[in-house]
Amino acid sequence: MRDVLAELISIWRAGDTAGLGTVVRTFQSAPRPPGASMVVAPDGSVAGSVSGGCVEGAVYELATEVAKTGAPRLQRYGVSDDDAFAIGLTCGGIIDVFVESVSRQTFPELGAVAADIGEHRPVATATVIAHPDARWVGRRLVIRPDGAAGSLGSARADAAVADDARGLLAVGRSDVLKYGPDGQRLGDGMEVFVSSFAPRPRMLVFGAIDFAAALARQGSFLGYRVTVCDARAVFATPARFPGAENVVVDWPHRYLAAQAEAGAVDAGTVICVLTHDPKFDVPLLEVALRLPQVGYVGAMGSRRTHDDRLNRLRAAGLTDAELGRLSSPIGLDLGARTPEETAVSIAADIIAKRWGGGGRPLTQTAGRIHHDAAEAQVAG
């Protein structure tokens, strides 16, 4: 829902009703992950996607119908359908899409959820997508680390789902949970889709240079909250980095240490060091490579700069294991030359490490194209 939240909240605030289709479950080579959504507005306009184009027409028709009737539907699309090649996923994947109407009446908590997401506060929504009693389908619980709002239908179900949803929220994962009709953990019959809205991950870019401006735009496009930091106030200005959420004037190592101390650096944070100046790089990398949790640390520079940097870091006492976490020279070998091409190269390296990709052309690989998050844990 995050990808269509602006359009959805606009319809909600106007007092209108939207049809919302959300991917809740995927099988095989599904093109969009759980949580991907498509909104159909009252005027028939569309925002978002559930399949990258394969079944959008069918979901559009269903969402239009559900917005009028108010009766939610769980629909499967894919090669298991007889008409797979008519409306299904010809790529071979299967997706379950839950379609519901969204209005002030059906989702009164949406305004508060949107505020949480906008302020980077963790929040999850748990929606009943299947139940023996049709009256339960579409009921929703909003879960936060310190409480919950709404109800699925019983105190027992609310307590069980809230507890499990907080576990998913803690790791930023969305999934379908199964229970008995009244929330029994060992039962069957009720399915609940938990959509987790963990705060967007951070990208910390050090070095106020033209490559940093291009990387800030790329990072923002990928969904990161981008901060550019440099000790030189004349270069570190918001006007030079419109793609960044924050531009900070401070010594890089001091800023990173303070952010880590404040708990603002975690396993999803990526750190890109672009200054290739040892008086900035070495103290900064001493801090970065010793952090217990960080998603990615990369540093720009030539191979000669890289070798000199490693020698300086070893002299500063960093171990081979700590140095092994450093991606340097930063980026994948794409033959990049311009700042924009280099930003794509760095982003590709970050994505590959996040999901466990090898960075090779798909024509040289076999098997599934998409990697599971579980396969990429070694990269985090």
Image: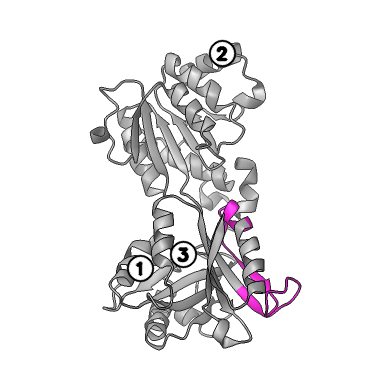
Q: Which amino acid does the dot numbered 3 rest on? A: Ala
Vertical position of residue 200 compared to residue 103: above or below: above
Q: Residue furthest left?
A: 239
Q: Residue 379, image x and y in percent?
A: 60, 41
Q: Residue furthest right?
A: 186
Which residue is at 55% across, 53% downward? 172
Q: In the figure, is residue 290 to the left or right of 84?
A: right
The answer to whether mark 2 and mark 3 are in CB contact below 8 A is no
Q: In the figure, is residue 45 to the left or right of 93?
A: left
Of the 4 image quadrants, the one containing the C terminus is top right
What is the span of residues highlighted in magenta in the rendered image?
167-191
Which residue is at 56% across, 48% downward? 355
Of the 4 image quadrants, the one containing the N terminus is bottom left
- Look at the numbered disc 2 and give the secondary structure of its residue: helix
Q: Residues within 10 Å of mark 3 (few under 14, many from 20)?
A: many
Mark 3 sits on what residue? Answer: 36
The answer to if 182 sits in the magenta stretch is yes
The disc placed on residue 311 is 2
Mark 1 sits on what residue? Answer: 8
Q: Which amino acid does the dot numbered 1 rest on? A: Leu
First in residue order: circle 1 vs circle 3: 1
Vertical position of residue 303 compared to residue 7: above or below: above
